Image: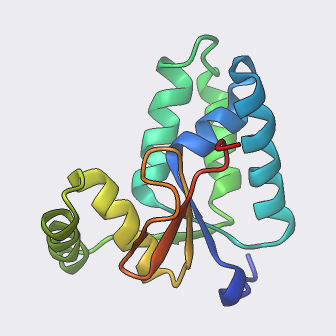
Amino acid sequence: MTENPANAVFVDTNILVYAFDETAGRKHSIAAKITENSWNDKNGHISLQVIQELYVTITRKIPHPVDIQTARKIVSDLSTWKIHNPTVEDVLKAIDIQRENQLSFWDSMLIQSAAQLGCRILVSEDLTHGQVIAGVQVLNPFIE
């Protein structure tokens, strides 16, 4: 995936789950558009953590789980996005982010991954909309 660093967007697992969960109503429509735009604009960024969480969630936790072969295809397709593979140094930085911002460790890892990929935006519904952490601004696309 060719990227434009100024437009780099890190997409949280929940957004991707909604994109593939047709029972999610309005959230599905919004998330599907974000995902489509990320592919078309070649600015989608994720981490290995996101891919793993997505696979488990869409095959086991949504109302109409995706079959394993379809989920495998989704994961394969997402491999064209820019993917962060965290190191121990990233884990240590995430621990610092967690401590400084009173966040969960896993949310801190997402922020660290986004920062490492040069993303200025993290699209997620799980963090405070508008908050800037480690140079990454959280945007909740479902806020009206």
| Residue 59 sits above or below residue 1 on the image | above
Query: Is residue 122 visible to us here?
Result: yes
Image quarter in which the N terminus is found: bottom right
The answer to which of 118 and 65 lies nearer the viewer is 118
The residue most toward the right is: 40
The residue most toward the top is: 63
Q: Position of residue 140 (x, y in %)?
A: 59, 51
Asked if residue 84 lies left or right of residue 5, the reply is left
The answer to which of 48 and 92 lies nearer the viewer is 92
The answer to which of 113 and 120 lies nearer the viewer is 120
| Residue 34 sits above or below residue 93 on the image | above
The residue at the point 39 percent across, 53 percent down is 49
The residue at the point 67 percent across, 49 percent down is 141
| Residue 60 sits above or below residue 56 on the image | above
The residue at the point 56 percent across, 27 percent down is 58
Q: Position of residue 2 (x, y in %)?
A: 76, 82
The residue at the point 32 percent across, 70 percent down is 86
User: Which quadrant of the figure has residue 113?
Assistant: bottom left
User: Which quadrant of the figure has residue 79?
Assistant: bottom right
User: Which quadrant of the figure has residue 96?
Assistant: bottom left
Asked if residue 45 lies left or right of residue 60, the reply is right
The residue most toward the front is: 144
